[in-house]
Image (cartoon, grey):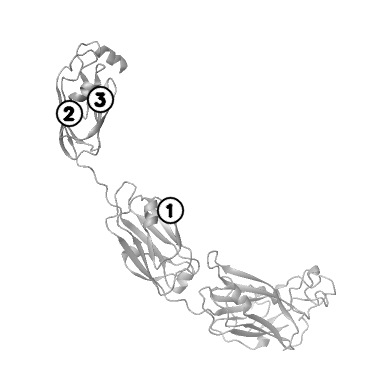
Amino acid sequence: MKDWLGVLSLEDTPKVLVFSPSSDAIDVNPETKITVLFSHPMSIQSCISAFSLEPQVRGAFETTDLSLKFLPKSELPSGGYIVRLTKQCEDKNGKDLDQVYTIPFRVGEKEIPKSPELESLLVLAGTESECLVGGIPAELILGEINSACSGIPGPPSFLVRFSKPMNQTEVELGLRIEPPISYRLDWENSSQFRILPDFILQADTRYHILFPKGIHSLDGSDLLETLQLNFLVGSDMSDPEVIGFGLESQNCGLGTQELGSITGARWDSGFCFWSRDLPILSPNLYQFRGGDDGTGISGSPLACPDVNTDNFRIFFNQYMDTTSVIGATRLSKISPPSTNIRLSTWVWSHCQSTYPFGCRQLTYSYAESEASCNGTLFGNISTGGDFNLSASAFAPNFYPYYEFRLEPEAKSISGKRMKVGFVIQVEAK
């Protein structure tokens, strides 16, 4: 280009080499800039005076000796325009432009981006049993939902998808949920995100999700109208209750072997003592074996380690408040009465990892003062403590009996208490 200009500059008369937009151009961008490239170094101020644009448009000039650029202050409205450059435009030697230049062009209609639309808003819903395992995604924009999950287990999430990438800051500032809840947004991409509540939702409550008119997509288009969708959280969960009871040694529990027996069971059976909808039988039909084997002596760790044939296991229909369940648990020897039974340790399972962190299965390990572990030093930490009930391998029939009791103070993570307590008597054999 430099060499080409050098050749052209040998001509006596300056000329316009390039006009942009070109003559008779159509559908010119409304944001266009008008550019003129000369063959000679020009007295550029004279060229500014010689330049005109009809209809008149306010703007500013950017110049060099070889170029003149007019920058409109705002976008050009659609329609026809004419650029004129008269011979008053001179080069640095005072020579006029070779001719008057008249360049017509037409600015097209500016393409208006399509407004963003809400394509999907998924809410977790279902029956109580379906909600307990996480719920089923339901499309809220297709119609009203009257069985949304409250968030047990874990606060529910709502998946939102727009038709185009959105201004994330405007969405986050504009989004409203009523009644007010604490939440955060997790953006999966610029058009899709999850609403993640910090807590479970209230049962039998209608929630409204609102996106206000005017929030923008990244291409500058805005939401034309306020979007408001609502859903109803389902009824409060049923009352918490015990649905099974057995021993750890029976491999008894949720997801493994949940069935009780109509005729009774031993510590080495392949099924639980009892499960919901079965009658509770006489104590002698539920037999466990005390984990202490009678070999312990004073200050000795013998007979102290945990044996699972006397570890009782209980499981529930709902996620339970762990503190209230432990506080409501009682185990006592009733024939003959025991002087001291302590809960040594316990293990919760089938728990949820998010708030409110309830569990559905609990295994208890008890220690008894009559057990031989540590001799007379009940629970001596220097010998590892005691995790078993007293030896029962040689106990006569119908002796001894223990009573396990869970008081009605035990409650679920939704705050509901058990309507009735759970009581069962078992025999140590």
Identify the residue position indicated by label 1 in the image: 187
Vertical side of 401 occupied by 307: above or below: above
Q: Residues within 10 Å of mark 3 (few under 14, many from 20)?
A: many
Q: Which mark is residue 313?
A: none
How many numbered discs sit on the rendered protein?
3
* Residue type (three-letter) at the residue carrying disc 2: Ser
Above or below, 294 against 337 in this view is above
Q: Secondary structure at mark 3?
A: strand
Residue 278 is situated, as x and y percent measured from the top left of the image, at 56, 84
Relative image position of residue 371 (x, y in whole percent): 78, 78
Label 1: few (<14), some (14–19) or many (≥20) C-alpha neighbours in 10 Å:
some
Residue sitting nearer the eye, 24 or 98: 98
Q: Residue 259's quadrant in the figure?
A: bottom right
The image quarter containing residue 392 is bottom right
Check residue 68 in the rendering and tell me which mark sits there, or answer none.
3
| Left or right of 176 on screen, residue 285 | right
Q: Position of residue 418 (x, y in %)?
A: 54, 81
Q: Residue 271 location, x and y as percent?
A: 62, 77
Q: Is residue 405 visible?
A: yes
Position of 384 compared to 85: left or right?
A: right
Badge nearest the viewer, 3 or 1? 3
* Amino acid marked by disc 3: Leu
Q: Disc 1 residue type?
A: Trp
Q: Earlier in the sequence, mark 3 or mark 1?
A: 3
**Comparing labels 1 and 2, the label whose residue is closer to the camera:** 2
Q: Earlier in the sequence, mark 2 or mark 3?
A: 2
Q: Which mark is residue 52?
A: 2
Tell me the quadrant of the picture where the C terminus can be found. bottom right
